[in-house]
Amino acid sequence: MELLAARGITKYFRDTLTLADDRVSLSLAEGETRAVVGENGAGKSTLARVIAGLVVQDSGAVFVRGRRVRAGSVREAEAAGIGFVPQASLLAGGLTVAENIVLGREPRLLGLFVSRRKAYIETAMLIERFGFRIDPDALVSSLSSAERRQADIARALARGGDILVLDEPTSILSESESERLFELLKRLAKAGKAILLITHRLSEVLKEADSITVLRDGAVVADMLTKGADEAQLSSLMARRKAEGRRSGSGPAASGPIGAGHNDFALEIRDLRLAAGARPLSLALSSGEVLAVTALAGNGLGRLENFASGMEIPREGEVLAGGVNLASIPRGKLRSEILCYIPSDREGRGLCLPAAMRDNLLILRRREFLERDWIGRKRRDSAAREAALRFGLAADPRQSAASLSGGNRQRLLLARELDRPRAVLVLAEPLQGLDLASQAETIALMRDLAARGSAVLLLTSNIEEVLSAADRVMALYRGEAAFEGPNEGASTGSKLLAAMTGSAVGSVA
């Protein structure tokens, strides 16, 4: 039975002169998982937001069980059975899972008082029914990325969602966390739920989806069953026929080596404790080297990110950049002159979404502009546009960062942080939300910056990213180094996986 149908969806953003979706149509049956794939800016997220009632389309319509859903109404979309799970979680960190799930529709006693007990019971029953692995009484701020994603899905289901629209649900999840999420989605599909999966991870598409819709430049270029498809075919279909304003040799202009020499320690971490009871961690990173550290959620990668970026000052141990303790360097100087930082929490820590792309791009360069430039804006607009184009962002720099898709938000962050070489690069999940072509470009840029003297600390839960970019690798388990050694390809990948899961602890080289 067909649950969802999108017919001729067209959306043109006049303020940015962007045709995001061009007469897009697709359908979704009961128990079906359909993937929508395409490069960044292909129109995937806009389509998802139209279906969820968050964006009003210019033409076309969305139907649920043959009944037309009023455009631009989240309430009506939810009432029709559409549950939307955005790429960036909207859950309130200070509330429990149960409080988030019933938020806006809280059960009440005598019609007056909110019943926390009923909220807990209703949430517990939902969690039990579909096999979620989350505690209804846990604060959302205490959840791992995978648990928060489950809570997002539970919230969508609680609002009557027979149709789940998931926008890049695994973008910040490790491989094992992604596998557990897809196990949950399979159970939901068997229960009759229809799942629309917006993603750039083709390996997941081929393994988990029943059917595929391919978007390119806002239009449907293929609609197929997954059986018989392969990554090469999908990549070819997704590839743009135009260069999106990208210049050859994109990235920062060459300016010679920036490190003091390939044998100097540009970044040192001394005796940091990443988890209670864990042995202290130490590492040293030379100029011109790429060190990748990987771990599953909850094993210390987040704490290491906080310390290495200077966002958190350690009580034990220290972090040094060029021999100077990060705690003694003024924050403005650290970020503008010494350390490039791409955070794993892109929306919460990396970008100011209400602000213009221009202001997000130039915040670290504000001293380059005289006061009259900030008033007149002409010079700022030109500088921002040039920086954006080098990273494939053809959008108007005056539009808000919030208007960008997840992949283009990541490009915006990369454009700001990698536009100028700095001595130390701390890159946490830098490829999240990027299509395959953009991932390859980013890795090439990372390697180029290292070749010119930057020390690159890559923090990622994705082993493939580690093996494609790093000179040296380390795996954490329960806050300790479980493996460390040179990157020797596939054999190193298997050692990392064993160390990350605790089956090879103690194999530090």
Image (tube, grey):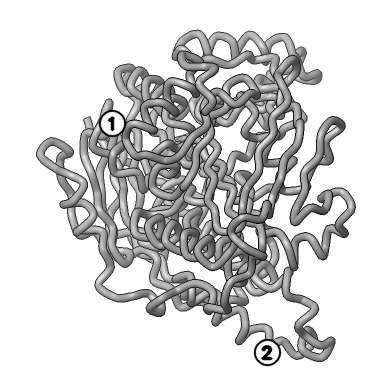
Left or right for 360, reference 466: right
Decide which of tag 2 and tag 1 comes sooner along the chain: 1
Above or below 464: residue 208? above
Is disc 2 placed on a helix, strand or loop? Answer: helix
Contact between labelled residues 1 and 2, with CB atoms less than 8 Å apart: no
Rendered residue at 66%/70% (across/down):
356
The answer to whether residue 35 shows anywhere in this view is yes
* Disc number for residue 208: 1
* Amino acid type at image mark 1: Glu
Q: Which residue in the rendered view is the most extreme toward the left?
A: 228
In which quadrant of the rendered image does the N terminus lie?
A: top left
- Residue 314: x and y in percent read 83, 36
**Image quarter for residue 276?**
top right
* Amino acid type at image mark 2: Arg
Rendered residue at 15%/45% (across/down):
224
- Residue 30: x and y in percent read 27, 28
* Disc number for residue 379: 2
The answer to whether residue 159 shows anywhere in this view is no
**Front residue of 498 and 335:** 498
Rendered residue at 68%/29% (across/down):
103
Above or below 195: residue 427? below
